[in-house]
Amino acid sequence: MHLENLTDVKVKLTPKGKGIFAGRNFCKGETVVVGRRVMILPERTNHSFQFDFDLHIELDEPARLINHSCDPNTGVRNNKFGAYDFVALVDILEGHEITWDYETTEYVSIAIPKCGCESPNCRLKTRGFKFLPVDIKKKYGPFIADYLKNPGSSTNEDFHEFVNFSGDRYSPTILQ
Ligand SMILES: [Zn+2]
């Protein structure tokens, strides 16, 4: 874990496993956690983040421990570390759990069979950005993975390969 993050956020145990909590108040627009790429993975895992149509990466802590919510308080922004910053979408009070929406980085096959985020607008299960209703996509504005902003801008071959991937081997969990 990087030092500058230690004072800003804290790791705590939740009923869902480890989670990341605000160690101070954050204003909307502030970067809450800076993620750094530590590894490129051969395929999606429970802890991976999708960075391009054919690229799954692992981030360092605390970024990798941030739990999903269908109504998250942070959004992602590509950063210079080949990873994502988690930016406050609203004012966040000290002590509140930091969350992000899996579907803002994962294109398909991210089925969380039963979401436990408990937000009033919980989508119950998540399947990826591709399947998100337009109004939810719009809600995040620029705070989604860059590669999702221009589908097809990546190499088309990779794109089609990825779309055809069934994802059956992936048994995701929202636990961290
Ligand atoms: Zn949910």
Image (tube, helix red, strand yellow):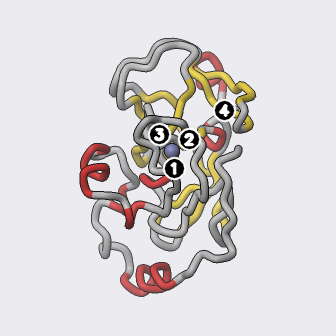
For label 1, count other residues whose C-alpha is less than 10 Å away and answer few (under 14), some (14-19) or many (20+). many
Dividing the picture into quadrants, the one containing residue 23 is top right
| Residue at mark 2 | 35
- Which label was assigned to residue 33? none
**Which quadrant of the figure contains the C terminus?**
top right
For label 2, count other residues whose C-alpha is less than 10 Å away and answer few (under 14), some (14-19) or many (20+). many
Q: Is residue 132 found left or right of 5 in the rendered image?
A: left
| Residue at mark 3 | 85
Q: Are marks 3 and 2 in contact (CB under 8 Å)?
A: yes
Q: Are marks 1 and 3 in contact (CB under 8 Å)?
A: yes
**Which quadrant of the figure contains the N terminus?**
top right
> Is the residue 107 above or below the residue 159 in the image?
above
Of badges 3 and 4, the one in the foreground is 4
Q: Is residue 70 found left or right of 49 in the rendered image?
A: left
Q: Are marks 1 and 2 in contact (CB under 8 Å)?
A: yes
Residue 71 locus on image (x, y percent): 43, 38
| Residue at mark 1 | 83
Q: Amino acid at mark 1?
A: Ala
Q: Residue at x 57, y 26 (%)?
A: 97
Of badges 4 and 1, the one in the foreground is 4
Q: Is the residue marked 1 within 8 Å of ligand 1, measured from its CB?
A: no
Q: Amino acid at mark 4?
A: Gly
Q: Residue at x 38, y 65 (%)?
A: 131
| Residue at mark 4 | 19
Q: Decide if residue 25 is in sight here.
A: yes
Please, what secondary structure does the residue beneath circle 1 have? loop
Determine the CA span between mark 3 and mark 2.
5 Å
